[in-house]
């Protein structure tokens, strides 16, 4: 299982490098089901793995001038603040036994996995649906819808903090629609935002997670290899064409996790 887990870790990076999102959607299931990491710890580990991998991948986009710093700051600051507060205060405050339904006890770990599975299902639909082709509208001065960007940035930060997901599937559409960025620039800017908020969220841990730095380093290394493969493949393959296929995979995984954490317990 460990070997399969490490191979799957490469896919985390490939997804980030190829389509700019989806890496974190794979990270938690890989850690929990293949590498036997506790669900709570897995959400913390995911923040580091995805953050570190995204940071490495963003360097290539920086060199190509495909990172919009102003957008990264405007969207990133509320995300960073909320993810830090979520990991430092909200997650530690969740009780070990949240509630019961009959004889079924919903523990903190089960709740985290269910929240993550629901996020996977939502993410899958954003990946599967066909986007309407629009004419390029990215010329002229950039205009920000500040209230909407700040609110969405804060929401993405809370989601990231709770379930350890980078939220690229939410960030990229927001950057394209609200900040009027071209897709490639949105991907590069998204990686910078994901890196900053994920790593700060990880280091904002409330202290309840014991970190296995050995495992974390190995998975991060494999994911880093994957992101370079993904960036290389992005030159050969249109990531948009692969997105629906990946979306169906994510949907199946999300439904599987919901069934496993409820009916199969």
Image: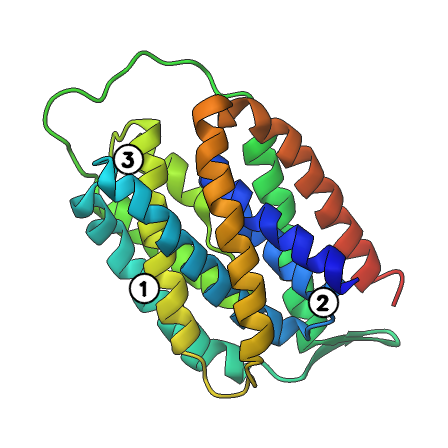
How many marks do you count on the picture?
3
Tag 3's secondary structure?
A: helix
Give the residue at mark 2.
35
In the image: residue 107, left or right of residue 42: right
In the image, is residue 174 above or below residue 198? Answer: above
- Kindly report the distance in space between the C-alpha atoms of the residues bearing marks 1 and 2: 28 Å
In the image, is residue 127 above or below residue 31? Answer: above
Q: Quadrant of the N terminus?
A: bottom right
- Kindly report the distance in space between the C-alpha atoms of the residues bearing marks 3 and 2: 38 Å
Q: Quadrant of the C terminus?
A: bottom right
In the image: residue 12, left or right of residue 96: left
Residue occupying the point 86% across, 74% down: 102
Tag 2's secondary structure?
A: loop
In the image: residue 164, left or right of residue 11: left
Labelled disc at residue 3: none
Give the residue at mark 1.
80
Q: Which of marks 3 and 1 is in front?
A: 1
Position of residue 7 measured from the top left corner of the image (x, y, whole percent): 68, 52
Give the residue at mark 3.
178
Residue occupying the point 58% across, 80% down: 212
- The first of marks 3 and 2 along the sequence is 2
């Amino acid at each position: 299982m460990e070997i399969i887990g490490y191979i799957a870790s490469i896919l985390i990076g490939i997804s980030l490098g190829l389509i700019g999102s989806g890496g974190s959607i794979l990270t938690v299931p890989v850690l929990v089901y293949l590498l036997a990491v506790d669900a709570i710890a897995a959400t913390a580990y995911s923040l580091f793995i995805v953050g570190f991998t995204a940071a490495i991948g963003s360097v290539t986009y920086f060199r190509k001038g495909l990172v919009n710093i102003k957008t990264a700051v405007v969207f990133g600051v509320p995300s960073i603040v909320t993810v830090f507060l979520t990991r430092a205060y909200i997650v530690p405050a969740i009780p070990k036994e949240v509630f019961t339904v009959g004889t079924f006890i919903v523990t903190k770990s089960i709740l985290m996995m269910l929240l993550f599975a629901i996020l996977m299902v939502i993410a899958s639909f954003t990946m599967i649906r066909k986007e309407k082709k629009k004419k390029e509208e990215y010329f002229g001065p950039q205009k920000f819808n500040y209230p909407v960007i700040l609110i969405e940035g804060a929401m993405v930060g809370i989601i990231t903090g709770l379930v350890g997901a980078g939220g690229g599937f939410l960030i990229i559409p927001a950057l394209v629609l609200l900040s009027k960025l071209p897709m490639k620039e949105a991907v590069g800017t998204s990686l910078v935002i994901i890196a900053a908020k994920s790593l700060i969220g990880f280091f904002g841990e409330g202290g309840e997670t014991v970190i296995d730095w050995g495992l974390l380093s190995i998975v991060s290394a494999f994911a880093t290899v994957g992101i370079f493969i993904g960036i290389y493949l992005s030159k050969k393959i249109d990531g948009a064409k692969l997105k629906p296929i990946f979306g169906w995979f994510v949907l199946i995984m999300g439904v599987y996790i919901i069934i496993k954490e409820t009916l199969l317990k």
